[in-house]
Image (cartoon, rainbow, N blue to C red):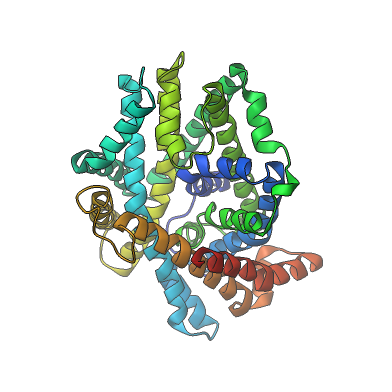
Amino acid sequence: MAKLAHAQWSSRMTFVLAAAGSAVGLGNIWRFSYMVGDSGGAAFVLVYLACVTLVGLPILVAEWMIGRRGQKNPINTMAELAANHGKSKAWALIGASGVLAAFLILSFYSVIGGWSLNYTLSSVLGTFNGQDADGISGLFGGMLGSPTTLLLWHTAFMALVVGIVARGVTKGLESAARLLMPALIILMLILVGYGVASGYFGEALAFMFRPDWSALNGGVVLAAMGQAFFTLSLGMGIMMAYGSYLGEDVNLISTARTVIILDTVIALLAGLAIFPIVFANGLSAGEGPGLIFVTLPLAFGNMAGGTILGLIFFLLLTFAALTSAISLLEPTVEMLEERTTMTRVTATLASGIGVWLLGVAALLSFNVWSEVLFFGLNIFDLLDTFTSKIMLPLTGLGAIVFVGWCLKRESVEAELGLSATGKNMWNIIARYVAPAGVIAVFITGLL
């Protein structure tokens, strides 16, 4: 184990909150729940849990292990561990890919985070009150069509992210995790409580948890595997960076299990918060991204107490966006802090400005640059597609292959504290099952 060289998480619980906060993002609030209802209900959940155990958990453990053993940013860690084990320093490209992926993702993620901030203010002002479907659609379209509006909220969101990350691990990342994650859960429970009182909670339960085994097919299994991979912030350099702040006393497998359970529970609670509102207002649950920014505002604008519920919901969405965004900025900041003479604050400002500039290009793709296309995609969609379908799977695959095949098996098994049976299971999953799962996700994404 490398000597501890820089900041450390103050406790295991704080680390769990930070890691879970990274995993719980905008996608968890609507995408997971929607996929559950559209892909077999409880049957999908069972497949998802199997996939997250066989694919997500080992890669999560692998990325934390790499970070903890290296105690440096993902690029330096991969280079040094590879050299120490007689492997090519080209393995550093895996770390570089993760850092770059996080940087690119945050550029367009911040734009969506800005939407959430905008809708939070709109809820306070009662903008949605009395609006019909055309009116709500017009508000969303008007926001996307206004570069000034998008720029304002993108800038505000990035300022919040930079302000948190610049404070460092203890005062920044930890403080944010301790504040935002409990607040997120409390807000979600309030919305679930409303769902129970609405009279449509039973319909939401049936929508999400009634098994429909006939809906299960190869496509659904691959979708569950993809969700298991992407929901845990794998392949982004985040978990390697977070692992570098992790002490030797933390059991990686049990901690990964805790994070996965927390992430899954929050995703399911999100569905139980959202769908009673949707059903109570006779709206469609199958709206994809429009569920958040069109369908729900329509419901909030035409229901008793909708102003308060809308405010709670978009605060919840903003908190989820922030916990993920600060983790997305951290790998780049850590890399600049360790590979240059920059201080923490300077590295955060430089990273934040770079992300902000690329985000400006992404938001302009909705309006003045809408006709600027690359491979038939605007800038926003290009960033999304390139990272999610290519960079993340390949980076995650590189991490699990490195741990499974390059690190000394004995040291890995000792670090994980595995029994004889556990050793055999880990080696089979890490060397064969998890890589095969990621390859399947990668190939499916390209089709």
The answer to which image quadrant residue 427 occupies is bottom right
Q: Is residue 65 visible?
A: yes
Residue at 67 percent across and 25 percent down: it is: 202
In this image, 421 relative to 309: left or right?
Answer: right
* Residue in front for this viewpoint, 252 or 272: 272
Asked if residue 64 is positioned above or below residue 12 in the image, the reply reads below
Asked if residue 386 is positioned above or below residue 135 in the image, the reply reads below
Residue at 30 percent across and 57 percent down: it is: 378
x then y, percent, for residue 311: 40, 24
* Residue in front for this viewpoint, 258 or 366: 366
The number of callouts visible is 0
Residue at 61 percent across and 49 percent down: it is: 260
Quadrant holding the N terminus: bottom right
x then y, percent, for residue 242: 48, 56
**Residue, far top:** 304
The answer to which image quadrant residue 441 occupies is bottom right
In this image, 35 relative to 324: left or right?
Answer: right
x then y, percent, for residue 321: 41, 42
